[in-house]
Amino acid sequence: MRAAGLRVEPTGQKDFGPCECCGGMSRTVWGVVHEGPRSLASYFVQWKLGQVPRHGAHFDLILGKWGEGTSRDDRVAVALRFRRTENGPSFMVVDAQDRPTARGELAGAALRPDQVLGSSWEQEAYDVVDAVWLKDERIREIVGDAV
């Protein structure tokens, strides 16, 4: 399992709301995933507090090359939607163009599911999500008893 060799560096957190439709508060946490000395991805996880079974969560990733001599054109945004199902936790690649990372300065392109599935980005995204799932303690409300 590649996630075991990845290091998660939590870098920030923000609560916001209340939501216009339900009055609930939301939380976003973010950080960086490293493989050895190399930064592999930036990530953002967003969910409504106390509403994970109902609303799930969003995992927004910025994948690609990081560091000196790179730019946003060296990176892409990939988005996954998390849901708890009767068969356990489930992730689905969704259109990153519909997520806030598409409007940010970190990625040069926001990928659609057909651009991710079956590509090298798919495995990279799932490796990063596995590492965040297992190692970022701030998302315990999402993980629940799944680990």
Image (cartoon, rainbow, N blue to C red):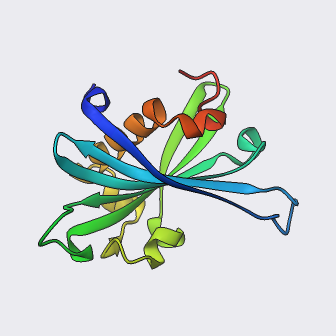
- From the viewer's perspective, is residue 91 above or below residue 22? above
- From the viewer's perspective, is residue 75 above or below residue 32? below
- From the viewer's perspective, is residue 141 above or below residue 70? above
- Whether residue 119 can be seen here: no
User: Left of 129 or right of it: where is 51?
Assistant: right
User: Left of 37 or right of it: where is 27?
Assistant: right
- From the viewer's perspective, is residue 14 above or below residue 143? below
Residue 53, horizontal then vertical, whole percent: 73, 38
Quadrant of the rendered image containing residue 61: bottom left
Quadrant of the rendered image containing residue 135: top left
Quarter of the image that includes the N terminus: top left
Front-lying residue, 113 or 139: 139
Determine the residue positioned at 52% across, 71% down.
100
Residue 79, horizontal then vertical, whole percent: 46, 57
Determine the residue positioned at 42% across, 54% down.
43
- Whether residue 1 can be seen here: yes
What residue occupies the far left of the structure in this picture?
69
Residue 128, horizontal then vertical, whole percent: 35, 43
Front-lying residue, 22 or 94: 22
